Image (cartoon, rainbow, N blue to C red):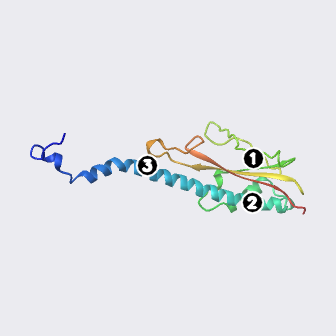
Amino acid sequence: MRVPCSIRPIACDDRGATIIEFAIVAPVFLAVLIAILQVALVYLAQDGLEGATETASRLLATGQAQQAGMNAAQFQSAACSALPSYMNCSALMVDVRTASSFSAADTGMPVLTYDNNGNVSTAFAYTPGGQAAIVVVRFMYLWPTSSGPLGFNISNQPGGKRLLLATSVFKSEYY
């Protein structure tokens, strides 16, 4: 039933309709916008981590790290120099292992363990192998995230962090 304008003049006034509609739509719009920005930052960090993994893996694939006698700390330092400037070296974890065959290479997501202070306590290996060795290099990075409105949360680790993983599997050259 239509309300006559002579009885309820406020019911026929539509001057504030736009602001009311915006007030209804704005929270959802802002939540989606924040979610898009969070996901874009994670993709940016993932791409940077993959680039650093590729660059550092080249040291092992060509035998430069083995011939220089690099230990785990020295290789980690070389890996940190390949990280983009927006990533912090202290959040990078490096795992280098050899495999007996490509099908036996472990490329899965690792399970991290934490100490009482919230620091990662998982032990990672550094066995770069020799000539013609099948090497698996995994770079892991704890990327900080924040939960957004309407329950949006992309963290998969404690402390509001997301574990990023970049893996390179290759057969080292004869050097």
Inspect the image, locate mark 3, and give the three-letter code of the amino acid beneath it. Ala
Q: Nearer the viewer, residue 12 or 149?
A: 12
Which residue is the site of mark 3?
Answer: 31
Q: Quadrant of the C terminus?
A: bottom right
Q: CA distance from mark 2 to mark 1?
A: 17 Å
Q: Residue furthest front?
A: 1
Which type of secondary structure does the marked residue at label 2 adopt?
A: helix
Residue 127 at what x, y percent from top left?
Answer: 83, 50
- Amino acid type of the residue tagged 2 in the rendering: Ala
If you read the primary sequence from the N terminus, does the residue marked by circle 2 or circle 1 appear first? 2
Assign the N terminus to one quadrant of the image: top left
Q: Nearer the viewer, mark 2 or mark 3?
A: 3
Q: Are marks 3 and 1 in contact (CB under 8 Å)?
A: no
Label 2 to label 3, Cα distance in Å?
38 Å
Location of residue 151 in the rendering, given as x and y in whole percent from the top left corner: 47, 41
Q: Residues within 10 Å of mark 2 (few under 14, many from 20)?
A: many
Relative to 26, residue 122 above or below? above
Label whose residue precedes the other's in the sequence (2 or 3): 3
Q: Label for residue 107?
A: 1
* Pointer 3 local density, CA inside 10 Å: few below 14, some 14–19, many at least 20: some
Q: Is residue 107 visible?
A: yes
Q: Which residue is mark 2?
A: 56
Mark 3 element type: helix
Whole-percent x, y for residue 79 in the image: 72, 58
- The type of residue carrying mark 1 is Thr
Element class at badge 1:
loop
Query: In whole angstroms, how far apart are the C-alphas of marks 3 and 1?
Result: 34 Å
